[in-house]
Image (cartoon, rainbow, N blue to C red):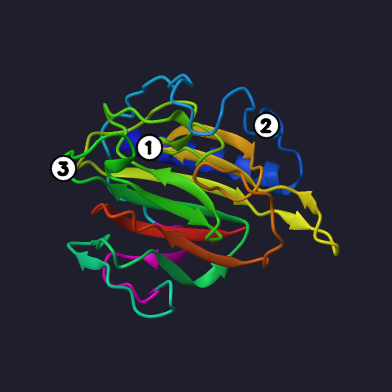
Amino acid sequence: MKKMSTFIFFLIAGIGLIALSAMTGNPGGRGQSQPSTQWGIHDMNRPQPPVVDPGPAGPPAPPPSDAVVLFDGKDLSQWTNEKGEPTKWRVEKGYMEVVAKTGSILTKKGFGDCQLHIEWSMPLAAEGESQERGNSGVFLMNTYEVQVLDCYENTTYADGMTASVYGQHPPLVNACRKPGEWQAFDIIFTRPLFDKDGKVTQPARMTVFHNGILVHDNVTLSGPTAHKARPPYKVHEDKLPLSLQDHGNPVRYRNIWIREL
């Protein structure tokens, strides 16, 4: 327990420093990296990131005192479907589960710059392959996706694998746990800024930890994430809902909290 507490302390401290760096305009390191033009979008020949064993999952990470708790395992009162109606996703045993063909869900509240913690797990029975195994997604501002997918001994295109910034940045490593085990994303997101004419003055950026392992180091987004495309930025509001994708697979989520930065 002492070892785990020390790990959590340094993880949160590291995330805090990265968030401060992003907010003060001093990204450093690979913070200015754009999506690679060396490879086509979803190119199956693109090299796969190395596999790293993240170790066993610990207990759910408790939310900080200033966090907005979006899901505490009890109900979906903070969420709606895409029509603004109550969602039909299932809630049981402390988690929510995607119900196929009921649509993605969105938070009632909008967010911009933020620190997000979200835990998820794949069905124990690994069915399908590539993008058809445990597919879902976490969309910041309902626009910028971090991919949820079962890539434990399952190969897909690198820029669409687990923890990728979909279609733009593969993760630095594959830190997936086995199906049925709980996994976590810790995401620092900085929203794009636009001038009065709609020109981008600062693109969106992301830092992502998957199971406590750094997989994106303040990377720059070229625009909204999309399938087989890299569309340009379009002016949008300063705060928009967080959304979780219904891709037809019974992915589970728990312990979702967010800190506005």
Which region is colored magenta? Answer: 63-80
Q: In the image shown, does 231 or 22 lie closer to the viewer?
A: 231
The residue where tag 2 is placed is 33
Q: Position of residue 17 (x, y in %)?
A: 62, 41
What secondary structure is marked by label 2? loop
For image coordinates 69% across by 44% down, the residue present is 22
Residue 78 against residue 112 in the figure, above or below: below
Determine whether, in the image, residue 151 is placed left or right of residue 20. Answer: left
Image quarter in which the N terminus is found:
top left
Q: Earlier in the sequence, mark 3 or mark 1?
A: 3
Please say whether residue 65 is visible from this viewpoint: no
> How many other residues sit within 10 Å of disc 2, few (<14), some (14-19) or many (≥20)?
some
Q: Position of residue 130 (x, y in %)?
A: 31, 34
The residue where tag 1 is placed is 211
Residue 72 against residue 159 in the figure, above or below: below
Nearer the viewer's eye, disc 3 or disc 1? Answer: 3
The residue where tag 3 is placed is 124
For image coordinates 34% across by 39% down, the residue present is 131
What secondary structure is marked by label 3? loop
Nearer the viewer's eye, disc 1 or disc 2? Answer: 2
Q: Looking at numbered disc 1 in the image, what kind of residue is underneath it?
A: Asn
Q: In the image shown, does 135 or 208 lie closer to the viewer?
A: 135
Q: Are marks 1 and 2 in contact (CB under 8 Å)?
A: no
Q: Earlier in the sequence, mark 1 or mark 2?
A: 2
Q: CA distance from mark 2 to mark 3?
A: 36 Å
Q: Main secondary structure of the magenta part?
A: loop
Please say whether residue 238 is visible from this viewpoint: yes
